[in-house]
Amino acid sequence: MTSLNQFCKDNALPKTSVYRWLTEQGHPTNNGVSEEMQVAILEQFKPKPEPTQEEPDSTAIRPEVLPEGFWQSSELAPIESKELALPEGFDAAAMIRHFDGVMGQATDTQSLVAIAKLAITAADGAMDAKLSAQRQALNQAEQHQAQLAAMVTEAQTNLKIKALESKMIAERQTSQTRQAEQVFAELMALGKPAAAPTGEPS
């Protein structure tokens, strides 16, 4: 099987006309054209010319009477080939610019991806470092808060005990001071002159 497009291209046939004719003949072309279909197409679009009968030329030399050495065969080159090479200093880019002066802009997307990966990795590392520092600061704050709570509780207990002791000392101090004042008053009372008896001349 050969595709219709390739077959028409190889045989210089109009594809549209061939396709229309095949459709009219009921030949599908979805899977290409078979050899039988190819023969039918060529007979339809390229009929062979009927051979013409030529009258014999009485002046022609008959093969059976050719003289010896009359026919000589030599190799004839079908074409004359020349080796071509680009001229020295040929610049293909200059030729392109001659026909297409507009140059598009392109970025090395592979480099963009690599740089993006580096940036994301750096940002991720910075975020990890920040989180680590935050966790460390939080742990330290929690330890200090617990330490402060224990210190305050202990200080409050100690202050309450000392305040109670201070109150007891103050009460004893007051008591002792009053007792000292009473003893001093009694001492001072001993030094007062005795009062004269009533009715006796002084």
Image (cartoon, rainbow, N blue to C red):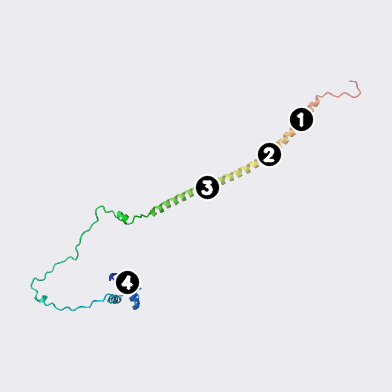
Q: Which residue extends farthest top?
A: 202
Circle 3 SS class: helix
For discs 3 and 1, the disc positioned in front in the rendered view: 3
Q: Which residue is drawn at 41% across and 51% down?
A: 115
Q: State the image coordinates of residue 133 (x, y, percent, origin top left).
A: 51, 46
In the rendering, at what x and y percent does residue 156 appear?
Answer: 65, 42
Q: In which quarter of the image is residue 94?
A: bottom left
Secondary structure beneath dot 1 equals helix
Give the Cα separation between the discs numbered 2 and 1: 26 Å
In the rendered structure, which disc, 3 or 2, sits on the residue that comes first in sequence?
A: 3
Mark 1–mark 4 distance (CA, rounded to whole Å): 141 Å
Q: Is residue 145 above or below residue 183?
A: below
Disc 1 marks which residue? 181
Task: Tell me the residue that label 2 is attached to.
Answer: 163
**Quarter-wise, where is residue 148 in the image?**
top right
Quadrant including the N terminus: bottom left
Where does label 3 land, which residue?
A: 134
Q: How crowded is mark 3: few (under 14 residues within 10 Å), some or many (20 or more)?
A: few
Nearer to us: label 4 or label 3: 4
Q: Earlier in the sequence, mark 4 or mark 3?
A: 4
Whether pointer 3 and pointer 2 mark residues with C-beta atoms closer than 8 Å, the reply is no
Residue 183 in view: yes
Name the residue: 56% across, 45% down. Answer: 141
Residue drawn at 71 percent across, 38 percent down: 167
Tell us which disc is closer to us: 3 or 2: 3
Q: What residue type is labelled 3?
A: Gln
Which residue is label 4 attached to? Answer: 15
- As shown in the figure, which amino acid type bears the numbered disc 2? Ala
Q: Label 1: few (<14), some or many (≥20) within 10 Å? A: few
Q: Nearer the viewer, residue 29 or 101?
A: 101
Residue 3 visible somewhere in the drawing: no
